[in-house]
Image: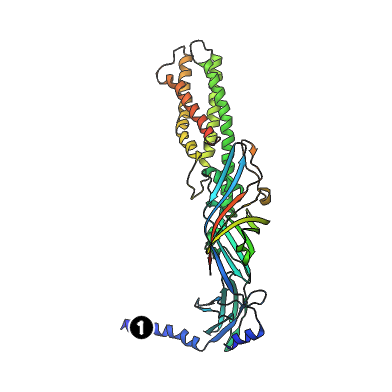
Amino acid sequence: MRILIACVLLGLPATQTSSQWVLEQSTLTYHVSHPLHQLDGVSHAARGKGVCRAGECEFLIAVSLRSFGSGDSNRDLHMLQVARGGLFPMVTVRTRLPEDASAAATIHADLEVQFAGQTVAYKGVPLQQTTQGDETRISGIIPATLTDFKIDPPSLLTIPVKNEIPVRVEMVWQRQK
Amino acid sequence: MHSRVATFALCFLVSVPLRAQVAGTRLSGTITDPSGAVIPNARISVRHVATGRAAAAHADSAGVYSVADLMPGDYEVSASADGFNTAVAHVTIGAEANQTMNVTLVSGLSLEDLGFAPTQTQGSTKDQARLDRRSHMLMVHQRIGLIAAVSLAATAITGTLAGGRSTSSTGRNAHATLGVVTTGLYLTSAYLALRAPKISGTKTRGPIRLHKLLAWIHGPGMIATPILGAMAFDQRSRGEHVHGIASAHGAVAIATAAAYGASILSVSIKF
């Protein structure tokens, strides 16, 4: 009790967690373009958490690379190989947002993406959000490219895929006070 | 009698460390973040390195924790809180009544906070090497397989010169030679596909299933066709009409070539 009073007297600010967010549902889809194929790899296995304190929320979303499926296991294993999934089995996305950002219809997030052993920052990625009670739905597209992550484009019949691999993100977050 | 001795011994063994702890040291401190702000309700775990005996505590709303009755020795102290990485520190507890150790927690959610086990999040060079080897072997399999398809087409074309009444020994020889080359390329390609490392936990899905299924037709066909062809070749070389089982050579070859072509298309065209 004396220590508590002393701390208050000394004016030590308390790092009080005001709220937390938990990722309830997610669909992450990467799109690959090839003259012979248009393919999408989908994962519903992402996990995420957000912690808010002092007016700022820190979010971490992570997903196993192996959880992405394009409907063709051979192609998925090839993707895993070119993305160095044996060495780096996870994709993570970190971002920090002001706690009051949940009031806006569109938020512009600075995303730090770790994938294939590289960390790439995407600034001001527009994400649409709708909130109902403690549940917030967020969707948007991360404009990823293969060169961002130093991945050699895989080829089919000697024709390489396009460099752009946009990742569509659809998430449902639950606020926990 | 034995049970009494055992009970006595057990009581003695249990009581020794308890008596030592009662007279032990109190370890306390404050949990803060790098800016100096206190972190309330942090979880503290103190483990005696030598015995593995552990004690747990929670910091109060002012970030202050306290663990009492620690006997002298080396301890591992870990502190964690929601939104912060777990910090682990070592401290040696002496004979004094109170000892202080403040802990600074660095902000940052971790994969452990999301419930991922370290085995899920840590890769290995061995796993990557396995994937690389698999991709390399299948790439060579694909290339040799395509060359075998060209060779197969040439063999089929020369087959028109090898069969029927008005054929020459030159046509038969050319057909037989190309057939041997095709078979060699095919078997090399098949070996690479069969020997490519399997990746555990992967369920076969999509067009590759049809690709593998068709191998049960063109695989035996690629073995039967040259055997039947050799029999037909001998019969023709002796001036005989092709007869018996050798007469199935053409039909087996067509079925094999059709299955092989479909197998290539199955992984080249999106259905």
Q: How many marks?
A: 1
- From this viewpoint, is residue B41 visible? yes
Foreground residue, B174 or A38? A38
Colour mapping: rainbow
Q: Is residue A125 positioned above or below A49 on the image?
A: above
What residue type is disc 1 on?
Answer: Thr
Q: Position of residue A39 (x, y in %)?
A: 57, 42
Q: Nearer the viewer, residue B102 or B222?
A: B102
User: Height in image: B1 above or below B179?
Assistant: below
Chain at numbered mark 1: B
Locate residue B134, reporting x and y percent.
56, 44
Query: Whole-percent x and y of residue B168?
Result: 54, 12
Residue A118 seen: no
Residue at left offset 58%, top offset 83%: B28
Give neighbour class at mark 1: few <14, some 14-19, many 20+ (Cα, 10 Å). Answer: few
Q: Residue visible at 53% across and 55% down?
A: A26
Q: What is the quadrant of the N terminus of chain A in the image? A: bottom right
Residue at left offset 64%, top offset 74%: B33
- Give the x, y percent position of residue A54: 63, 72
Residue of label 1? B7
Specify the quadrant of the image occupied by residue B46. Answer: bottom right
Q: Residue furthest left?
A: B1
User: In terms of image quadrants, where is residue A32?
Assistant: top right
Which is more toward the observer, B100 or B5? Answer: B100
B186 left or right, relative to A10: left
Q: For the residue labelled by badge 1, is the local secondary structure a helix, a strand or a loop?
A: helix
Say above or below: B79 vs B111.
below
> Residue at horizontal 52%, vertical 41%?
B195
